[in-house]
């Protein structure tokens, strides 16, 4: 009977242990149930990236964000300003890693590269038609691809011709050119009389689209309705030859093949070029960096071709498709770009607004302004061009590849590596091949 007693005692100890474990389990369950459940953050944060707007506009954005947070106390905004030269690589990396900010300041040309990969939210289902109609129709359209909206228009600039009155006077020129035909004549005269260049324009593929836009102004159709190259035409050959001839005649600095638009600004500020195609906002930079040049600078309408078309450059706000806070992001993007805030930013930055009401109010303000400073003169010219201006090169898939094909073949013709006709043909073939 001794072994039976041992078994009995073993069972008692086992049940005691199980009872203790059960009691501990109940106690832990009770403690956990009594612990308050963590609540989601009362202030979700959205991240907002801009392009090189610090430190000039730090006060503006701090106030803008504070106003938004006051109106929307459940949302916080973290502002990150990214250097212009770094934005492309940073946003590409962030989108690929799914760590993109919630609202990003880009331009339609670059944004369209990622729009074609469906990186941005389709705004047509998120922004109502009455809200979309508050923006200038052609400007809203600039941020669409395949008839789907991927961006909200923000601020605009139309190029003006900033010119050095003393240099033109030394060359015997009484007024700046208004067409590319006149520009070629002025370029020769400035070089002959002063030994300097009339202007600088870049042929670096990843930089300014000014040359590409000049093709459209000269009457060249870049692509057809199917997206195939449409510039291998007499008009396209003429446009290619225009730039090739200027280079071969020594009327363009050799650095146009290697330096970007920043070099155009530096040359103008150094008094080495007679004209600068840029936005009115750069006059402030010239006043700071080269006051002597600024004193003899004036502004004229932008140069165009036989079509008379004038460009408008658009900056927009996009919302990445992978954002975890789409409603808050869109609400903030619409707040930044509403009429009141666009007017305030246009005044602070010497740019143009993009809502219908803001444009009307802006032009009224300019008309009532009696000052005649160089900056005010440029702003008036820029605003007066807005009614006729358009986005000359609309957003399209692989736009960067089109610009690269044209610019690189232009360079080859400039360096006598190809004839103009061959360069045009090769550029068209390269673009069409990239699409297949």
Image (tube, grey):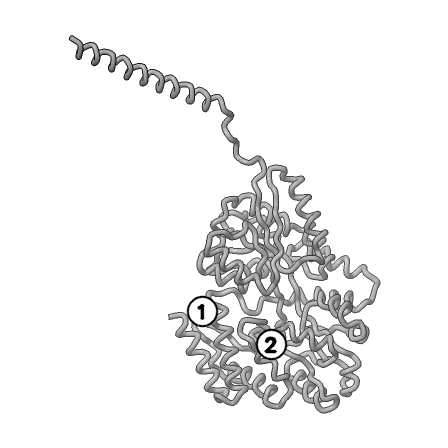
Label 1: which secondary element: loop
Towards the viewer: 261 or 430: 261
Query: On the image, which quarter does residue 317 sit in?
Result: bottom right
Relative height, residue 165 to residue 334 (above, below): below
Relative height, residue 156 to residue 23 (above, below): below
Circle 1 or circle 2, nearest the eye? 2
Residues under labels 1 and 2: Cα distance?
Answer: 33 Å
Relative height, residue 352 to residue 195 (above, below): above
Number of callouts: 2
Query: On the image, which quarter does residue 270 sit in?
Result: bottom right
Residue lying at the far top of the rendered structure: 1
Q: Which residue is mark 2?
A: 259
Do tag 1 and tag 2 residues touch (Cβ < 8 Å)? Answer: no
- The quarter of the picture where the N terminus appears is top left
Q: Position of residue 91 (x, y in %)?
A: 52, 58
Residue depicted at 64% across the width and 61% down the height: 156
Residue depicted at 44% across the width and 81% down the height: 426
- The quarter of the picture where the C terminus appears is bottom left
Q: Position of residue 135 (x, y in %)?
A: 61, 55
For the residue carrying disc 1, how many other residues have a C-alpha within 10 Å: few (<14), some (14-19), or many (20+)?
Answer: few
Q: Position of residue 165 (x, y in %)?
A: 78, 79
Label 2: which secondary element: loop
Residue depicted at 65% across the width and 75% down the height: 263
Q: Which residue is mark 1?
A: 225
Query: Which one is earlier in the sequence, the residue at label 1 or at label 2?
Result: 1
């Amino acid at each position: 009977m001794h072994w039976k007693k041992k078994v009995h005692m073993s069972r008692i100890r086992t049940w005691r242990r199980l009872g203790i474990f059960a009691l501990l389990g109940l106690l832990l369950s009770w403690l956990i149930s009594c612990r308050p459940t963590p609540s989601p953050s009362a202030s979700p944060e959205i991240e907002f990236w801009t392009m090189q707007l610090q430190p000039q506009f730090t006060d503006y954005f701090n106030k803008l964000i504070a106003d938004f947070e006051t109106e929307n106390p459940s949302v916080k905004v973290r502002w990150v300003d990214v250097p212009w030269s770094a934005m492309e690589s940073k946003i590409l990396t962030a989108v690929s890693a799914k760590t993109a900010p919630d609202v990003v300041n880009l331009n339609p040309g670059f944004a369209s590269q990622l729009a074609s990969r469906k990186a941005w939210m389709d705004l047509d289902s998120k922004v109502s038609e009455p809200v979309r109609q508050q923006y200038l129709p052609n400007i809203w359209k600039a941020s669409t691809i395949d008839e789907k909206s991927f961006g909200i228009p923000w601020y605009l600039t139309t190029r003006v011709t900033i010119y050095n009155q003393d240099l033109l006077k030394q060359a015997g020129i009484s007024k700046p050119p208004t067409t590319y035909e006149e520009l070629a004549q002025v370029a020769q005269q400035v070089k002959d009389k002063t030994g300097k260049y009339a202007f600088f324009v870049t042929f670096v593929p990843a930089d300014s689209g000014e040359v590409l836009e000049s093709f459209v102004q000269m009457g060249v159709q870049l692509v057809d309705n199917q997206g195939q190259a449409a510039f291998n035409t007499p008009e396209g050959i003429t446009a290619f030859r225009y730039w090739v001839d200027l280079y071969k005649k020594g009327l363009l600095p050799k650095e146009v093949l290697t330096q970007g638009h920043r070099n155009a600004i530096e040359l103008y500020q150094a008094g080495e070029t007679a004209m600068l195609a840029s936005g009115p906002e750069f006059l402030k930079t010239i006043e700071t960096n080269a006051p002597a040049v600024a004193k003899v600078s004036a502004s004229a309408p932008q140069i165009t071709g036989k079509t008379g078309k004038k460009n408008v450059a658009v900056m927009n706000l996009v919302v990445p498709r992978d954002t975890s806070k789409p409603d808050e992001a869109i609400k903030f993007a619409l707040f930044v770009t509403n009429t009141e805030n666009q007017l305030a930013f246009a005044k602070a930055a010497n740019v143009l607004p993009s809502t219908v009401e803001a444009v009307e109010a802006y032009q009224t303000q300019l008309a009532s302004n009696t000052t005649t400073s160089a900056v005010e003169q440029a702003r008036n010219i820029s605003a007066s061009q807005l009614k006729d201006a358009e986005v000359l090169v609309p957003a399209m898939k692989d736009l960067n590849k089109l610009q690269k094909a044209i610019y690189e073949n232009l360079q080859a013709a400039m360096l006598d590596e190809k004839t103009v006709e061959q360069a045009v043909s090769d550029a068209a073939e390269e673009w069409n091949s990239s699409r297949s």
